[in-house]
Image: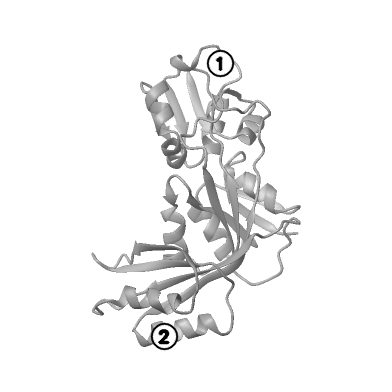
Amino acid sequence: MTAVAYLGPKGTFTNVAVDALFEQGDTISYRTIPACLDAVDHGEVDVAVVPLENAIEGTVHLTIDYLIHQVDVSIIAEAVMPIEQHLLVHKDFTGDITSIDQIYSHSHAIAQCHHFIHEQIHEAEVEYTSSTGEAAAKIAQAQGNHAAIGNVLAAREYGLHIIRYNIHDYDNNHTRFAVVQKQPKPIKLRDLMATHHKTTLMVTLPSDYSGALHQVLSAFAWRKMNLSKIESRPMKTGLGNYYFIIDVEQPYDDILFPAVQAELAALGCQTKILGTYPCFPIVAPTSASSTKK
C-alpha cells in the first residue's frame, strides 16, 4: 500500500487530486507544502502530492524553491485539475452574502476570487490560512457571519453550506499538481490516460557569460525540442543570481537530452533533471447546481 502525503487537512484541492490519482493507499495530510516534501524526503511516506502551478496565480514558488533548495526528490507524475472555488458558510448561517464580515482561505484562493470579493463583499475582512481545507474547518467550528473559500469536497467534509457557487474570476482555472518521490519504486495510480509526457530541468547560468540564456534556449531549439515553460527563480545567493526551470514537452531519452546537457556544460551551465513524467488530466467533484452566479 502506498503512503501518500498531501497538503491538508481534508477537503483541500490537493486532497481531491490524491483521491483522483490513487485508488488505494494510506493518505496522510500535512499542514504545509514543506512538511509534505520533508515527509517524502525523510522516508516517512512513499510519495507526496503538492500544488505546482495555477492558471490564474502562476507558479507556487514555495513548492519550486523547496524542491530546489531543501529536498532531493524527483517529479514522477503531474495531474492537471479544473478548480472551482465556492463560498462556504456554517450550516446554521442565516444571513445573506452582504452580511459576511470575514473570509478565510489560502492566499491563492483569495487571489483567484479577487474581483468577486471586491465587487460583492469588499467590506469583509480577509484572513489567510495554510489551505482551503483549513479555512473550511475553521468555519465549521465557529458561529458567526464568516465564510470560507473552498471546494465541494470541503463543504461535504465539514458539513458546510455553499452560499455562492463558482466565485473564481476566470472560468479557465486549473492547477497543476506534482507527484514526487525519493526512492524509485513502482507506484500504482488509477487507470488514467496520460495526455503527454514532460521533462523538467533546472539550469544554472554562468554569472559572467554574456548571451548565455540565448545559447541555452538555442540548444533546445535547433533540436526541435518544444519548451512549454521557462521561469527564473533567485538562487538566494545574491541579487542578480538566478536559476531557470524549463519544461520540455517530451520524455527524457538517451540521445537528445544528454546532448543538450553536454552543450550546456560546455557553456559553463549546470543542469539537473527534476523529473521525466506522464501528465494526467483529472476531474474534481462538482455539484449539479454549480452554475456561475
Query: Where is residue 106 shown, x and y percent of the image?
Result: 46, 39
Secondary structure under tag 1 reads loop
Chain-order first, disc 1 or disc 2 = 1
Camera-near label (1 vs 2) is 2
Where 53 sits versus 111, above or below? below
Q: Residue furthest top?
A: 94
Side (left or right) of 56 relative to 184: left
Residue 139, position as x, y percentages in the image? 53, 26
Front residue of this view, candidates 60 and 142: 60
Q: Disc 1 vs disc 2: Cβ atoms closer than 8 Å?
A: no
Q: Amino acid at mark 2?
A: Glu
Q: Position of residue 145 (x, y in %)?
A: 48, 18
Most foreground residue, 107 or 38: 107
For residue 263, the mark is 2
Are there few (<14), some (14-19), or many (20+) residues within 10 Å of tag 1? some
Q: Is residue 238 depicted above or below 139 in this figure?
A: below
Q: Which mark is residue 32?
A: none
Horizontally, is 92 left or right of 231 in the view?
right
What amino acid is labelled 1 in the image?
Phe
To which quarter of the image does residue 99 belong? top left
| Relative to 144, 127 lies left or right | left
The answer to whether residue 8 of the structure is visible from this angle is: no
Taking the image as drawn, is residue 117 in sight? yes
Taking the spot 53% from the left edge, 59% from the top edge, the residue there is 37
Is disc 2 surrounded by few (<14), some (14 to 19) or many (20+) residues within 10 Å? some
Colour theme: one colour
Q: Residue at x 34, y 84 (%)?
A: 267
Q: Residue at x 50, y 49 (%)?
A: 32
Q: Secondary structure at mark 2?
A: helix
Q: Which residue appears at 65% of the width and 55% of the height? A: 4
Which residue has dot 1 on it? 93
